[in-house]
Image (cartoon, rainbow, N blue to C red):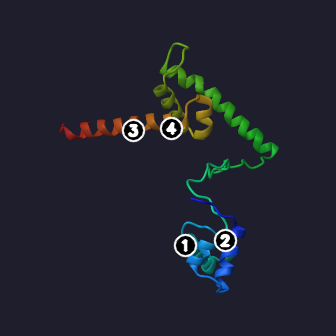
Amino acid sequence: MAKYSEEFKIKLVTEYLNGNLGYKSLAKKYNMPSQTPIQDWIRAYKTKGIEGLKPRLKGRPSMSKNTNKPKKKEEKKLTREEELERENELLRLENSLPKKNESFSRESGCLPRKAQAKVAFELKEEGFRLKDILLVVGIPEATYHYHVRKIIYGLVYLLFFVLSFPL
């Protein structure tokens, strides 16, 4: 399939619209194998004007560098007092973490993810922000929610099991 320039298309369309020649004679005059492109160009010109004769991209568009990912929320500028309160909150969280770790594991090794999720859950119950807890504990948010869901479903199943047997 031959590609034709925008100027060439405009020339043929204006020549057709002036009434000098028809589709077939224009195709023969300019050595085109078919009259169909000329018909398409005239139709495009009548509906969209010169914009309809401009070349357009075909196929799948390439991936742009600017994807439509939601931008991270910019944290608002905190005052000095708010920064100190935030730092104090994180320090309280870090101080309460070893106490929780001791309750789950006597050795000072790494806790499994399930135990880390339990620690994070308990810290959340004490009123700390989940984002801060996960930062200090060092587990991804998805892992936390996975283990918490398993814990809650386990409790629901246990409660159902206990209530299903009469005393």
Dot 3 or dot 2: first in sequence order is 2
Depth order, front residue of 109/121: 109
The residue under label 2 is which amino acid type?
A: Lys
Identify the image quadrant of the C terminus. Answer: top left
Q: Which residue is mark 4?
A: 142
Residue, disc 2: 9
Residue shown at the point (39%, 35%) measured from the top left? 150
Q: Which callout, 4 or 1, points at the residue further toward the start of the chain?
A: 1
Question: In the drawing, does residue 119 fall left or right of residue 13?
Answer: left
Q: Earlier in the sequence, mark 4 or mark 2?
A: 2
**Closest to the observer: 17 or 149?**
17
Kindly identify the amino acid type of the residue bearing the numbered disc 1: Gln
Q: Residues within 10 Å of mark 2 (few under 14, many from 20)?
A: some
Instruction: Please name the amino acid that badge 4 sits on.
Output: Ala
Query: Which residue position is annotated with label 3?
Result: 152
The residue indicated by pointer 1 is 35
Q: Is residue 128 visible?
A: no
Answer with the quarter of the image where residue 124 lies: top right
Question: Nearer the N terminus, badge 3 or badge 4?
Answer: 4
Between the C-alphas of marks 3 and 4, the distance is 15 Å
Closer to viewer: mark 1 or mark 2: 1
* Marks 1 & 2, CB-CB < 8 Å contact: no
Quarter of the image for residue 19 reads bottom right
Viewer-nearest of discs 3 and 4 = 4
Viewport quadrant of the N terminus: bottom right
Q: Which mark is residue 47?
A: none
Q: Residue visible at 57% across and 70% down?
A: 37
* Residue 16: x %, y % from top left: 64, 81
- Measuring from the top left, give residue 4's x and y in whole percent: 65, 64
Q: Nearer the viewer, residue 107 or 140?
A: 140
